[in-house]
């Protein structure tokens, strides 16, 4: 078996690297593997071998398969600690976000389905109302989880999930941290338009961006 490093050629690696750099806005080629990001990663205990510098290395080597499906992409909490520590100002949170989107577009099953469900529910609610409505977010998120568990015949997980969320909801109500009304942001149309424009830019062939 050969690793991606042994199969590497600049020509084969370039398209994937270029796409990730353009979509994330991060200059991955500036990384010189000092590992300052790895030393401070908040989820380092859970991602093991997969540190931000390793993820960047995979993208540079054009190892698309590994870069789109690994624990760091799905467990990164976008805390930006790594970016703050990076001497080259590389924000790995933007890279993991980009790779999540690319994995979804490629119909790759997420390693953490709950993270993917939360991500989609959050984005949909934010786009619909211009801000996230907690009741809607949690309702849609839970429906997604329950449907997936029901499809997999995982009924104990459904009961655990419902119990856990009921406990959390009650605690939030008591602390007055749960809003029941649907609130809209004044600028929601502008937010939708911005999102649409960003999507069009991403889908336009190189050199054709408005
Ligand atoms: S801190 Fe920055 S330059 Fe150093 S390994 Fe991480 S991403 Fe690369
Ligand atoms: S932004 Fe993500 S990759 Fe960077 S330190 Fe936080 S959890 Fe780790």
Image: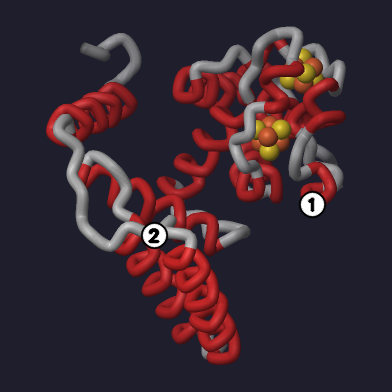
Please give the residue where the numbered disc 2 appears in the rendered image: 178
Where residue 158 sits in the image (x, y, percent)? 52, 84
Between 204 and 180, the one lying in front of the other is: 180
Q: Is residue 36 left or right of residue 174?
A: right
Residue at disc 2, secondary structure = loop
Q: Position of residue 15 (x, y in %)?
A: 53, 23
> Do the CB atoms of the residues marked 2 and 1 lie less than 8 Å apart?
no
Few, some or many C-alpha atoms within 10 Å of disc 2 (few <14, some 14-19, many ≥20)?
A: some
Q: In this picture, is 161 found above or below 70? A: below
Locate residue 9 relative to residue 124 in the image: left or right.
right
| Pointer 2 or 1: first along the chain | 1
Quadrant where ligand 1 appears: top right
Quarter of image, res 85: top right
Asked whether the viewer can see residue 62, the reply is no
* Location of mark 1 (residue): 46
Residue 163 coordinates in the image, percent (x, y): 54, 83
Q: Which residue is pictured at 59% across the width and 36% down the height?
A: 78
């Amino acid at each position: 078996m050969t690793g991606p490093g042994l199969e590497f050629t600049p020509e084969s690696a370039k398209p994937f690297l270029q796409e990730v750099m353009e979509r994330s806005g991060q200059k991955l080629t500036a990384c010189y593997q000092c590992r300052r990001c790895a030393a401070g990663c908040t989820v380092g205990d859970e991602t093991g071998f997969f540190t931000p510098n390793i993820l960047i290395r995979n993208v540079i080597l054009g190892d698309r398969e590994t870069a789109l499906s690994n624990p760091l992409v799905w467990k990164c909490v976008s805390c930006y600690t790594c970016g703050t520590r990076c001497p080259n100002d590389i924000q790995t949170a933007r890279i993991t976000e980009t790779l999540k989107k690319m994995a979804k577009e490629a119909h790759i099953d997420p390693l953490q389905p709950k993270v993917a469900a939360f991500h989609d529910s959050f984005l949909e609610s934010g786009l619909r109302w211009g801000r996230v409505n907690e009741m809607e977010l949690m309702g849609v998120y839970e429906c997604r989880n329950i449907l997936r568990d029901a499809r997999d015949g995982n009924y104990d997980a459904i009961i655990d999930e419902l119990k856990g969320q009921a406990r959390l909801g009650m605690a939030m109500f008591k602390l007055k941290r749960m809003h029941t009304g649907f609130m809209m942001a004044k600028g929601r149309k502008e937010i939708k338009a911005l999102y649409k424009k960003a999507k069009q830019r991403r889908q336009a062939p190189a050199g054709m961006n408005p």
